[in-house]
Amino acid sequence: MGMKPELLVTPKDIEAVESLFEAGADAIVIGEEKFGLRLAGEFDLNAVKQATEIAHGKNKKVYVSMNALFHNDKIDALSGYIQSLKEIEVDGIIFGDPAVLMVAREIAPEMKLHWNTEQTATNWFTANYWGSKGAKRAVLAREINMDAIVEIKENAEVEVEVQVHGMTAMFQSKRTLIGNYMQFQGKNLEVEKRDKNRNLHLHDPEREARYPIFEDENGTHIMSPNDICIIDELEDMVDAGIDSFKIDGLLKSTEYMKVVTALYREAIDLCVDDRDTYEDRKESYVSKIEEIQPNNRKLDTGFFFKETVY
């Protein structure tokens, strides 16, 4: 067997960093809304520094998300921010916009770059294209199936990261769609807080689906009604040598994330070291996660085995 896949998670605050590492995470993704999309929590540079000290003390890694799409007015802020991340010595920067890659290569040429646009990483040519430009990892789209993931890994010259758990983004618009709608309805926006904590949903009674929806500096985000969970389907990806498995903790409590992280830690270790025991236990992992799933959020396998119809 090759190396174990990295277990990558998204903490919502500094306390969560400590406890998710204890639960078995190898690495975390953090950052701030201004530069990164759909983060579980807001980490300013001070918090990034603290998290990095905690991580490096435990031989773990910190990746900072800068995968927003930048307009001209934000470009000037990139170099100062990347300079700070270099000084903090974070382990990598996640980018979608080539502007980030260009600034990083100039200011922090040693910095590890992970290419993540959330939806366009659907083939290995594209992964290798960004590899040739300096990226060391490609984060695969959530809309491709297991065979495609394995095929990409076989042909990729960069590391490959796959989301194995949590919600996914279905739609993003730079417009403040909810705000515009409320205004159109003549409602007072000051009262209508539209952040992640407000728990707004689009409800589709026909499919009994609730789509979490929130607005932030990057616009309006509509999320999947179900959570991906493939803790019982890790074999093909482990055997293919996928480099990193990500659990997305967006809109989840730290308590939830601790349980899920610990279960995936055990599942990955057994899948690599003791396949028979993994096969025996994998159903129980799913039931344990089902027990703590938030109401209205079913588990499914996303696009791994079928074309999901939302």
Image (cartoon, rainbow, N blue to C red):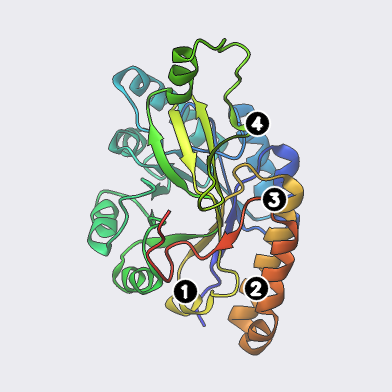
In this orientation, which residue lies closer to the viewer: 163 or 45?
163
Residue 67 place in picture, x, y as percent:
41, 38
Q: How many residues crowd around disc 4 within 10 Å: few (fewer than 14), some, or many (20 or more)?
A: few
Q: How many residues crowd around disc 1 within 10 Å: few (fewer than 14), some, or many (20 or more)?
A: some
Q: CA distance from mark 3 to mark 4?
A: 14 Å
The reply, left or right, for residue 263 in relation to residue 196 is right
Residue identified by numbered label 4: 197
Q: Are marks 3 and 1 in contact (CB under 8 Å)?
A: no
Could you tell me the amino acid type at mark 2? Ala
Could you tell me the amino acid type at mark 3? Pro
Q: Are marks 2 and 3 in contact (CB under 8 Å)?
A: no
Q: Residue at x 42, y 48 (%)?
A: 112
Could you tell me the amino acid type at mark 4? Asn
Residue 68 place in picture, x, y as percent:
40, 34
Q: Residue at x 40, y 69 (%)?
A: 306
Could you tell me the amino acid type at mark 1? Met
Residue identified by numbered label 1: 237
The disc, 4 or 2, on the residue closer to the chain's N-terminal end is: 4
Residue identified by numbered label 2: 267
In this orientation, which residue lies closer to the viewer: 188 or 165?
188
The disc, 2 or 3, on the residue closer to the chain's N-terminal end is: 2
Q: Are marks 1 and 2 in contact (CB under 8 Å)?
A: no
Residue 11 place in picture, x, y as percent:
65, 44
The disc, 3 or 4, on the residue closer to the chain's N-terminal end is: 4
Residue identified by numbered label 3: 294
